[in-house]
Image (tube, coloured by chain):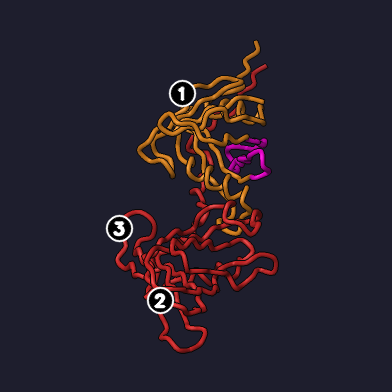
Chain colours: A orange, B red
Amino acid sequence: MAIIVASCNKTKSTSKRIMKAGEWNVVELSVDGENQEELPHWTINECDIYSEACVGSWQNDEGGATDFVWQVTDKGGSFIISRQGPDEGLEHADEEMATQCFDFSGTYEIIENDRTMMKFTSTTTQGFSGQAAVITIEKV
Amino acid sequence: MVALASCKKDADLVEVPPPVGNEVEVITTMTLLFSDDAGINPDVTATFRDPDGDGGLDYDIFDTIRLMNNTTYNTSILLLNETVSPADTISNEVLDEDDEHFFCFTPSLANLFIVRTDSDGMYEVGLQSQWTTGNAENGTTQIVLKHQPGVKDGTCAPGETDIDVTFVTEVQ
């Protein structure tokens, strides 16, 4: 008899999916249907979701970047983004990413969850409360 | 063979720290301090104040700049954040980061000439300037502070606008 139980919850499996891809292009970053002019790229490192805050990098093509903590929760149904890092003395390109990442920080509902594409939506982001923020990411 | 992985719950997840915003300087108040270079005419001050910064409540002070004709004034700009107590002197921070800041002056008056008289070592800044009036006339003067970290080039084009005020201006 062989009984093997590997993945026992969707929070963990969704988190693994995000980590495994590692590099994601944000192909939609919109508010009430209007896309942002500058779409970032995410780099996600491996982490233990039960023992550390998982950190990603929110980057643009100009070399600007900011860190954010991310977390899958609610049995794989929600995704949290929380911009981290210094709050002043930033170079222009970093400042752009810090502002964008902060504005889109919040708790999102995961509405699509595929190995190569995920889609999140929220109406409670820091910068656009009450408006529909949508993030769609595609595996690089 | 029986292998069971322990099944952790969402309650076992680490707490997510709250998001950290990129601090944006609030400027509520711009005061212009004019001093006659020849020491003849009285000093002049003109203030714009929006007590809660950009948006929200309207301004509560918006002076007209009233200067004497055919006079050269040495001019300083004082910027304050009066949403905090005591007020934060933002112009000190502009001076500390003078290589990232640039004031742009646009008078509509034909005979009012404004030149910046301070420098960050490479480019002018505009916290200090010289205003030279001609004959009596009326118009406006727009003053814009640009924040240009890493992109300052001595022009008004790059960067973000920190404050933009257009004063009614009378040369008497």
Residue A46 within the segment the image draws in magenta: yes
Secondary structure at badge 1 equals strand
Location of residue B1 in the rendering, given as x and y in whole percent from the top left corner: 68, 16
Q: For mark 2, does the 10 Å Cα neighbourhood hold few (<14), some (14 to 19), or many (20 or more) residues?
A: many
Q: Give the residue at x 53% y 69%.
A: B114
Residue B111 is situated, as x and y percent measured from the top left of the image, at 47, 68
Which residue is at the front of the view, B54 or A133? Answer: B54
Real-space Cα separation, disc 2 to disc 3, in angstroms = 29 Å
Task: Tell me the chain of label 1.
Answer: A
- Marks 2, 1 in one chain: no
Front: mark 2 or 1: 2
The C terminus of chain A sits in image quarter: top right
Q: Disc 1 marks which residue? A: A111
Look at the numbered discs 1 and 3 and tell me whether their residues touch, using CB distance below 8 Å: no
According to the picture, the residue beneath numbered tag 2 turns out to be: B67
Q: Which residues are magenta?
A: A42-64
Residue B106 % position (x, y): 49, 61
